[in-house]
Image (cartoon, rainbow, N blue to C red):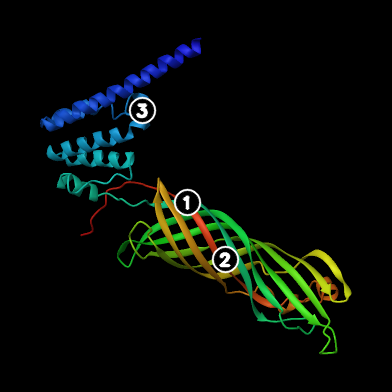
Amino acid sequence: MKRLLLFILFSGTSCYTLAQCAQTLRLVRATYEQGRLNEIEAQLKSCLEPAEKGGFTKQENQLRVEALKILTMSYIYLEEPQKADAAMLSLKKADPYYRPNSEVDPAEFVALYNSYREEPVYRYGVRLGVNYSRPNIMELVSVVELADESKFKALPDFQFGAAMDLPIMLFKQKNKWTLHGEVLYQMKKYEISIRENRSNDPDNPLLNEFIGTESQTSIGIPITLEYRLLANKLNPYLALGASPDFILNSTLFGELKREDERGVEERTLDVERKNINISALAALGIKVSSGPGLIVFEIRYAHGLTNLSSPETAFANQSLALDYGYADSIFKLSSLSFAGSYIFNKHNPKKLTRKK
């Protein structure tokens, strides 16, 4: 019973406070229209306090913004520039996405608004995507003489992690360039199909086929420089950059099939890979405004620049060579990825200083 009474008392107090500030704002509108500008500061003082001290609540944030707008305009007309600056800063902190209407709002108010930083200082968020990876063979190494149709096939796998945007000014172009970075946990895999004709009779081939799937896990730190192509709802961009990938482990799941003979059973084997794979990146994407941030869709190509294997490790796993007839070729790994992100805007309103 006591809890119910406390709840009713608290709810009644909150409703009273909410109604009180809404009523105060109606009074302030009338005061402004009548030109009694020097009374507005005192009228709004209590309602511009934090919510816990009796000011506008979070649900009334748009009312707070309107009150700050009226207060800013009153300071402008009273020729109190320092107070007008402080009120405008409070307005932008209350709603970083507020934009004045140049056709309706006073020119002095619009000019003061434009003297403050509008863009976020950085963005942060999460990223999830799928990649298709395939080795680029630099030197083919084989235990046997290969038959036709031996191939390497790209397979899909997942990647996820954190992303960050840092808007920058480059070549005196504002709002065009963004430095973008990520930390990704990446899983990549591809299929190997190696065929051998063990028959000496060309008219009666006897085929051995090694089928394997190599899986890699790595931590990637891609860094790109983005250029916004158009300023519209989609905000398409082009990006170039590079990524060092730190390989955590690499395994090969394979089997050997033999025509007219029993094959070699499936087994998972460790393979030696170099610890770092460096790739050049090229990407095309869009950024769509949504709530307090951006939804990002991107297609990215990563072209491997470093060899992941070497001649010294081609036969390092003797079981692969002796039991399956497979040796490591010298290769670089490239991938095509499709990813989506959601990144939050982080605003820090600040008055811009003009360079003389």
Locate residue 333, reporting x and y percent: 62, 71
Label drawn at residue 128: none
Q: Nearer the viewer, residue 39 or 296?
A: 296
Marks 3/1 in contact by CB < 8 Å: the verdict is no
Look at 17% across and 42% down and name the residue there: 81
Marks 2/1 in contact by CB < 8 Å: the verdict is no
**Mark 3: amino acid:** Ala
**Mark 1: amino acid:** Tyr
Label drawn at residue 244: 2
> Which residue is denoted by mark 3 in the rendering?
51
Q: CA distance from mark 3 to mark 2?
A: 48 Å
Locate residue 136, reporting x and y percent: 62, 76
Locate residue 253, reporting x and y percent: 76, 65
Q: Classify residue 311 by image quadrant.
A: bottom right
Disc 3 crowd, CA 10 A, few/some/many (<14, 14-19, 20+) = some
Q: CA distance from mark 2 to mark 1?
A: 23 Å
Q: Nearer the viewer, mark 3 or mark 1?
A: 1
Look at 23% across and 58% down and name the residue there: 355
